[in-house]
Image: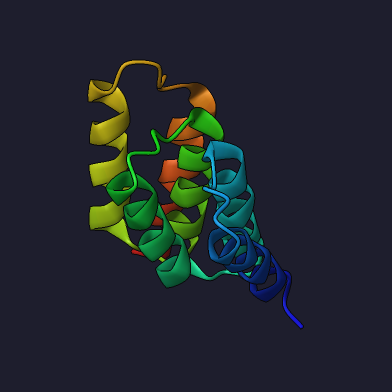
Amino acid sequence: VLQTDLAFELLNTMKSRGIAPDITSYASCLAACDKEDEWQRSKDLFEEMQQNNIKPNNVACLSALSSWSKAGRTNEVFELIEYMETTDGLELSLKVFGTAMVVCDKNK
């Protein structure tokens, strides 16, 4: 069983019991997606988080960025950097840009 599957199972159990996931719950699932190269699940989850008015933090953004970069998802990577740049509380850092540069190597 993939760790991503377990993380999503726990997330769905929370929801089914009426417990609203918070940023920590989402960030943990995004990290699991990153570790197992599940970029599409990561993207879907990131969108779900925003639809549920859960503001991403730097940890969540970095996990998504890493997942999308490793998958060569150039548009998504640059859209997320732009989102981070224009959203209060999120900071662009050396780690953000270094993680994003992975996509450049993937698409050479």
Q: Position of residue 22 (x, y in %)?
A: 54, 40
Which residue ends up furthest to the right in the rendered image? 1
Q: Position of residue 82 (x, y in %)?
A: 23, 33
Image x and y of residue 69, in percent: 43, 55
33 lies left or right of 106: right
Looking at the rendered structure, the number of numbered marks drawn on it comes to 0
Whether residue 75 sits left or right of residue 52 in the image: it is left
Which part of the image, by quadrant, shows the C terminus?
bottom left
Residue plotted at (56% across, 66% down): 16
Q: Nearer the viewer, residue 76 or 30?
A: 30
Q: How is the image coloured?
A: rainbow
Most extreme residue toward the bottom, as rendered? 1
Horizontal side of residue 77 vs 71, given as left or right: left
Of residues 41 and 18, the one drawn nearer to the viewer in this rendering: 18
Against 58, residue 9 (above or below) is below
Residue 108 in view here: no
Q: Is residue 66 visible?
A: yes
The residue lying at 60 percent from left, 47 percent from top is 25
Kindly identify the residue that appears in the image at 42 percent across and 43 percent down.
100
Q: Is residue 93 above or below residue 51?
A: above
The quarter in which the N terminus is drawn is bottom right
Identify the image quadrant of residue 68.
Answer: bottom left
| Image height of 85 relative to 21, above or below | above
Q: Residue at x 42, y 19 (%)?
A: 91
Residue 46 picture location, percent across and down: 39, 53
